[in-house]
Image (cartoon, grey):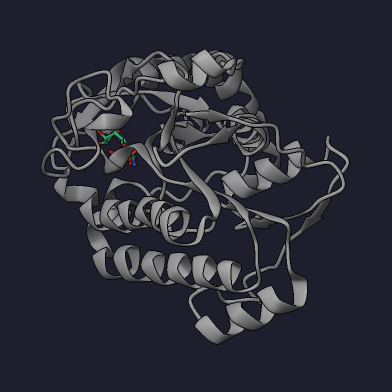
Amino acid sequence: MTNLHYSLAGKKIWVAGHRGMVGAALVRQLETIDCNIITATHGELDLTRQTDVEHWMAENKPDAIFMAAARVGGILANDTYPVEFLIDNMKIETNVFSAAHAVGVNRMVFLGSSCIYPRLAAQPMNEDALLTGPLEPTNQWYAIAKIAGVMMTQAYRRQHGRDYISCMPTNLYGPGDNFDLNESHVLSALIVKAHQAKEADAESFAVWGTGNPKREFLYVDDLAQACVFLMERYSADETINVGCGEDITIRDVAQTVADVVGFTGTITNDLHKPDGTPRKFMDSGRINALGWHASTSLKEGIAKTYAWYLEHGA
Ligand code: GDP
């Protein structure tokens, strides 16, 4: 692992995917640094269209890129739209990497996902677990596309000496999350369900599956801080995990959400819905050793996310 200091001050930084939850958090984080942030909305630039990306990149020539653009979604969306999750993500990645290299962009942080690790990887999962076993079937399409993105960083490093790196965030949540129950990840879904149950004076709300799976949840602004930290200090072929260091069962996180929202009824299980992978707890020892640690507690993060939902999403 190489430690470097790459300063973002004064640089032109493209946040690809700035309308997404992660990209928006990256913009918030970069606004605290003296750099020139550039963005393009989906209407201005469709990242699945190769020549459009080539032209945009040639016109804008960023110094560095945070590659947070992706087609994302929760367990049901992944299972329902395998084509989009595989193909759109592969297109977006190939277009961004090849156009960036063509115009001389030398620094990029690509965001992966903890679902790229094998379904039954030893826990906590460290970076060496990559490609050591079969993937979780419900999100394998997305995982393969993300694995390809990690390999692209390595290929551009090896063949062209580009300083592209990847990091592997655990399950994320926060302001700007998707609160559509058919598309969302679990934490935002639980906020919606608990809120609606409270508003309707309902006796219960249901979590999907058994409630037994465990997940590690990272507040998105903590991730954004980690990405900037890595952009400035990390350079290596190997991907690097970004987690908060604790995981929790879906049952317990549902109860925590209910407590924050103020729902006092019961929580039931919808056993027609999948559990997905039983556990995906990441070993974040390497980024911790470099000096980064998550700072937002789960309760605090849920409270901030609920406040955002009440203002923007409810
Ligand atoms: P995953 O981490 O890729 O499996 O994605 P999710 O965040 O969508 O799901 C995490 C876990 O939460 C899985 O075990 C789901 O079955 C469970 N879960 C419980 N209730 C819900 C819900 O309302 N929505 C979603 N997306 N997942 C839920």
Compared with 27, 156 (above or below) is below
Specify the farthest residue to the bottom: 51
Residue 233: name its quadrant: top right
Q: Position of residue 19 (x, y in %)?
A: 64, 56
Q: Position of residue 248 (x, y in %)?
A: 34, 16
Q: Position of residue 146 (x, y in %)?
A: 35, 53
Q: How many marks?
A: 0
Of residues 75 and 49, the one drawn nearer to the viewer in this rendering? 49
Of residues 274 and 100, the one drawn nearer to the viewer in this rendering? 100
Residue 202: name its quadrant: top left
Compared with 154, 25 (above or below) is above
Tell me if 7 is positioned left or right of 276 in this view.
right
User: If the image is split into quadrants, where does the C terminus sit?
Assistant: top right
Q: Position of residue 169 (x, y in %)?
A: 45, 35
Give the residue displayed 45% in from the left and 64% down from the top. Answer: 93
Of residues 276 and 280, the one drawn nearer to the viewer in this rendering? 280
Residue 33: name its quadrant: top right
* Picture quarter with ligand 1: top left
Give the residue displayed 40% in from the left and 51% down from the top. Answer: 154
Answer yes or no: is residue 196 visible.
Answer: no
Tell me if 45 is positioned left or right of 268 in this view.
right
Give the residue displayed 54% in from the left and 43% down from the top. Answer: 177
Tell me if 12 is positioned left or right of 106 in this view.
right
Compared with 297, 238 (above or below) is below
Answer yes or no: is residue 12 visible.
Answer: yes
